[in-house]
Amino acid sequence: MPQLNFRRVFWGGAVLIIGALFVVALIPQPVPVDLAEIRNGPMAVSIRDEGYSRIRDVYAVAAPVGGRLLRVEREPGDRVEPGDVLARIVPVSPAMLDARSEQAARAALSSAQAALDFARADLERARAERGLAATEADRAARLLESGTLAQEGFDRANVALRSARAAEQTARAAVRMREAEIEAAQAQLLRVEEGENVTGDLLEVRAPAVGQVLQLHQESETTLMAGTAILDMGDPYGLEVVAEILSEDAVQIDAGARAIIHEWGEDDAVLRGRVRLVEPFGFEEVSALGVREQRVNVIIDLMDEEEVWRGLGHGFRIEAEIVLWESEDVLQVPVSALFRFEGDWACFVEERGRARLRRVEIGRDNGVTAEVLAGLGAGEQVILYASDAVSEGVRLAERDPG
């Protein structure tokens, strides 16, 4: 009999324990979540993209004439002053003439000499006529004073004198023209022996401004055509930054906007800048993913002292952040707490350990936080990255940050 009572007590207790466990299992467990507090603070909306540094005024030094370039002794990094010799060129000798061209050139020279003789003879005739006209004008003046010549005769004598002077000037100009034709014909007949430099003097190419040699396009001795680039130079302290911004973002940027230069060479160091110009002409660029993009160059002036960015050079890669809007006191919510609900923005707010759905009106968004215009207040806790397990009224348990 005592044994029977023990069994009843045992099985009764087991049933109670199992029932209790079943009831506990049916009770909803709190959902672990990450919480963030709504608070006021500084906020900025900016655009960040890659770019490069460049010297503001780069001089492309080219050969002014065709000829033989002697070896360039300058090296990249050399400092130069205005007038310093950058390169030396032996001007090219004129080409040799073939027999037919030489004969034509000699005939042209003979024709030019004959024309010069004719022009000189015409000049002598014009001088004689001018002298005669001057004598007649003097005689007419004396006769007019004595009353033996009418005014009309005196006027005709002066007109003839002026015409004779004009004819003499025309003849003198014709002589100069024929002399120039002879010089041109003689230049065609220049013959050059092999290795002889007819032009003679060595031409020195000099620095147009103070600066530094940036890049050599030609270093060894070679033959160049006129206009061929020899080297690039510029003032390394006249540095600016060019940010290549998507055109749809560039339209939001105004001259004078604050800029921050990242990833320019020193760990976590940034440079201060100011937008000087948004270029009015865009260009097409293919991204790393093969997408064609329209981009615009945004020119940024560096605001820090030269000693801060002394190591930055021409063509160095940087990342530019351009601030579109900023404020020191903005009520803001993490973007990770927001989601779309029935066409509006919404989030879950923690109230007394439970989740409450809240519609929110937001303003500016920088990708990390969003400006709160209505729906939330400072100090409230919102749920970050709310999962499907979070719903209206569900119990919450804050996840351990560690």
Image (tube, helix red, strand yellow):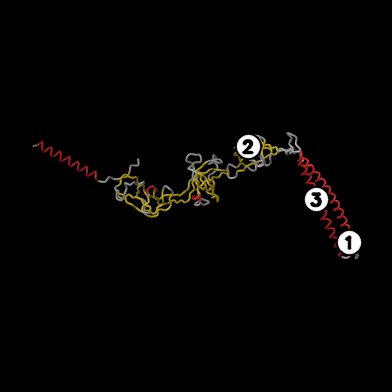
- Mark 3 or mark 1: whose residue is earlier in sequence: 1
- Residue type, numbered disc 2: Gln
**Disc 1 residue crowd, few under 14, some 14–19, many 20+, Cα 10 Å:** many
Task: Quote the CA–CA distance across marks 2 and 1.
Answer: 75 Å
User: Which numbered dot is residue 310?
Assistant: none
Q: Nearer the viewer, mark 2 or mark 3?
A: 3
User: Which numbered dot is residue 140?
Assistant: 1
Q: Name the residue under label 2.
A: 218
The percent position of residue 71, horizontal first and vertical second, equals 65, 34
Say if mark 2 contacts mark 3, CB within 8 Å. no
The percent position of residue 135, horizontal first and vertical second, equals 89, 57
Q: In which quarter of the image is residue 134?
A: bottom right
- Residue type, numbered disc 3: Ala
**Disc 3 residue crowd, few under 14, some 14–19, many 20+, Cα 10 Å:** some
Q: What element carries label 3?
A: helix
Taking depth in this image into account, of 125 and 292 the one nearest to the observer is: 292
Q: Nearer the viewer, mark 2 or mark 1?
A: 2
Q: In which quarter of the image is residue 195?
A: top right
Q: What element carries label 2?
A: loop
* Image position of 47 with respect to 7: above or below: below
Q: Name the residue under label 3.
A: 174
Task: Quote the CA–CA distance across marks 3 and 1.
Answer: 31 Å
* Image position of 146 with respect to 171: above or below: below
Task: Quote the CA–CA distance across marks 2 and 3.
Answer: 47 Å
